Image (cartoon, rainbow, N blue to C red):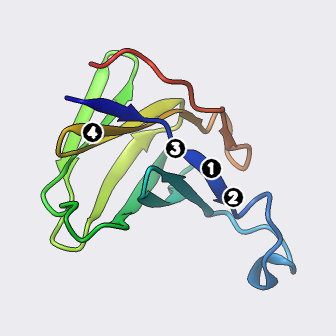
Amino acid sequence: MTGIVVPKLVFDSWQDASPACRSGRTEDRHLIYEGEGVILDLLLRQSADGSSIHVGGHVLANSSAEQVSGSAVVMEQGRRRMETQTNALGEFNFQTVPDRSFDLCIVLGRRRFEIRGLSAPRPRMWQVVPSMAGGGG
């Protein structure tokens, strides 16, 4: 592993007023992160019963040499760890994520694209805690 990419949040649908959202806040939250030529488009959706969230994402790379299909995607919540892989288009999802803080890591070749501190402590109160680089893992 050669490096950890700590991306910057460049769009948050709950913070940035887009024409579609001006009429009121939607339950879903759309986040876009960018770091070192990699873009992560995330959608967080509350379950109907409010006990969990659905996390869907799309990984895009500026370089055609960067492989995004078949990349490992790891979500951690304390000691709980869930894994999946991106499909041929760089998409992934986690269906039932308990409604609390989680970290997300996408392994792209020899780099790790990490977002730490995504949380949903209460329905309608999702927040994004600034990312901080951590030791590899």
Check residue 12 in the rendering and tell me which mark sits there, or answer none.
2
Question: Residue at point 70% right, 64% down?
Answer: 13
How far, Cα to Cα, is label 2 from label 3?
A: 14 Å
Residue holding disc 4: 111
Residue holding disc 3: 7
Tell me the amino acid under the disc marked 1.
Answer: Leu
Determine the image quadrant of residue 109.
top left
How far, Cα to Cα, is label 2 from label 1?
A: 7 Å
Sequence-wise, the earlier of marks 2 and 3 is 3
Question: Residue at point 32% right, 57% down?
Answer: 93
Q: How crowded is mark 1: few (under 14 residues within 10 Å), some or many (20 or more)?
A: some
Give residue 65's position: percent from left, percent from top: 19, 65
Decide if residue 122 is on the left or right side of residue 58: right
Give residue 34's position: percent from left, percent from top: 52, 54
Determine the image quadrant of residue 74.
top left
CB atoms at circles 3 and 1 under 8 Å apart? yes
Give residue 88's position: percent from left, percent from top: 15, 72
Decide if residue 124 is on the left or right side of residue 39: right
